[in-house]
Amino acid sequence: MSKKLVAYFSASGVTASLAKSIAEAAGADLYEIRPEAPYTKADLDWADKNSRSTIEMNDQAFRPAIADQDADIAAYDIIFVGFPIWWYIAPTIINTFLESYDFSGKTIVPFATSGGSGMGKTAEKLQPSVSPAALWKEGKVLGGRQSKDALAAWVDSLNL
């Protein structure tokens, strides 16, 4: 049986709630990807050209520091990686996370929450941050409120 981890970044709590439900449905452990400097409400104001999130997302090479690098990735076979969609892609802190560990031989399953957009170019932007020896599954945007049955059916459909 494969050992699973749900690693997630959540700025507002929506993705955190979904990640916990996915971990339950998948029989997975949970790991929060925390920024070294937590995001404030002002940081997340996408309408402000000078907000932290806008500045970060306008520079795809930017890598926000994460609070720790103690996820035991080596102990897992399958890693679900969750995040909110920002500007039609994953926040760059997800690249920081993916570049901080060796995912060779791991299966990565991205999932996201969004206020209305799809995955966009998320996979295209994230895959270069991961070893080519990792298996990348197609990502999915999931609503913040999914039933346990719906999440279990999604996890089962992945044929992990």
Image (cartoon, rainbow, N blue to C red):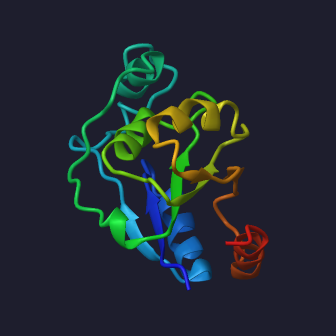
The one of 53 and 110 positioned closer to us in this rendering: 110
Whether residue 106 is situated above or below residue 24 in the rendered picture: above
Whether residue 75 is situated above or below residue 43 in the rendered picture: below
Identify the residue shown where x is 46% and y is 43%: 131
The one of 119 and 100 positioned closer to us in this rendering: 100
Count of numbered marks = 0
Identify the residue shown where x is 32% and y is 40%: 39
Q: Quadrant of the C terminus?
A: bottom right
Q: Is residue 98 left or right of residue 150?
A: left
Q: Is residue 123 left or right of residue 68?
A: right
Residue 77 place in picture, x, y as percent: 49, 69
Q: Is residue 71 left or right of residue 113?
A: left
Q: Quadrant of the N terminus?
A: bottom right
Residue 31 place in picture, x, y as percent: 37, 66
Identify the residue shown where x is 73% and y is 40%: 118
Residue 21: quadrant of the picture: bottom right
The one of 6 and 39 positioned closer to us in this rendering: 6
Whether residue 20 is situated above or below residue 15 in the rendered picture: below
Identify the residue shown where x is 36% and y is 31%: 42
Residue 127 place in picture, x, y as percent: 55, 38
Residue 151 place in picture, x, y as percent: 70, 73
